[in-house]
Amino acid sequence: MFGYVRAQREELTVWQDTLYRAVYCGLCKEMGRCTGQCSRLSLSYDMVYLYLVRAALTGVVPQMQKQRCFLHPFRARQMLLHDAELAYAARVSALLTYGKLCDDLSDERGMKRFGKRMLRPVFGAAKQRADLSELYTRIDGLLAELSALEAEKLPSVDAPADIFGKLLAEVFAYGLDGNAEKIAREIGFRTGRWIYAVDAADDMDEDAKRGGYNPFLLLYGGKMDDEQRRYAAMAMQYDLSAAAAALDLADKSSLSPILQNIIYLGMPAAAEKAVREKEKHEQKSV
């Protein structure tokens, strides 16, 4: 979906990196099985993170096996074998992709809009095959709430980030109960808030050119000084710290070090890049 939630693979052990890649490849295959071959176009590491969180909370023990796929027919690679949480991540990917596609159609113009209109029936079929209508109703309602808030052009990052946080809280916690549900909900909420803020920071230049809504543009007039960058980075880090604290409440598993890598290293690096790239762009334009 967004592509910001990734591990720093060079900091993983060989086994951890192998498992991380195996989840990605296994998820790709599972998407083809659950929601159709075309849905594999939306594969992202964001859904790997969703799988890892839920698998860790539900006690799933991932099983890998060397397999081939049509993209890599000559070299077998480790792939995660089917389990309930992998199937859930595959199905949720279709819901989120379709929801984002519909949301983008209200903003895009020209060829981008035409291209997304062409894709909507494809991912609409994938959403139907996902067979998670109750969850999609919640997602769709929150996306509508988010669109309405963005239409007001409110100069606030927190308000829209909260709504997207609630959306991912629903996704992470759906079907769970007890402590697992509470922990998943908190991790999803904090991750959603963080993704919204990082995406807004990353899209400042593009939104400025096309006149799109961006809370950072409204807050800072299109440019962020050093103090404002530090404040934005601190706000993003607060949500990551809260997500890490929630993860610490879960029983430790073989997946915990990979999740810690993502939250402590990968996501902060993505936030730093999103904020600091704007700084470099502003320096060049002066």
Image: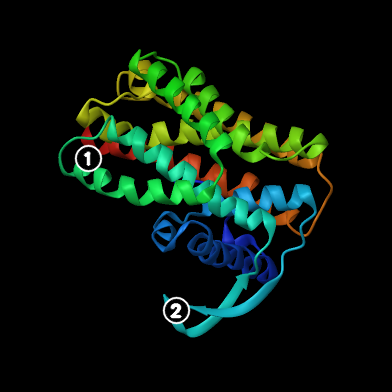
Give whichever of discs 2 and 1 has the lower sequence position. 2
Percent coordinates x, y for residue 77 in the rendering = 56, 78
Q: Position of residue 46 (x, y in %)?
A: 53, 49
Q: What is the three-letter code of the residue carrying label 2? A: His
Number of numbered markers:
2
Please name the residue that numbered disc 1 is placed on.
Answer: 113
Residue holding disc 2: 72
Quarter placement of the C terminus = top left
Q: Residues within 10 Å of mark 1 (few under 14, many from 20)?
A: some
Tell me the CA gap for discs 2 and 1: 32 Å
At horizontal 53% and vertical 59% (from top left) the residue drawn is 34
- Judged left or right of residue 44, residue 23 is right
Tag 2 secondary structure:
strand
Residue 270 horizontal/vertical position (percent)? 49, 45
Q: Residue at x 25, y 43 (%)?
A: 117
From the viewer's side, name the closer residue of 182 and 217: 182
Q: From the viewer's perspective, is residue 65 above or below residue 57?
A: below
Q: Residue 120 at what x, y percent from top left? A: 32, 45
Q: Quadrant of residue 21?
A: bottom right
Query: What residue type is disc 1 on?
Result: Arg
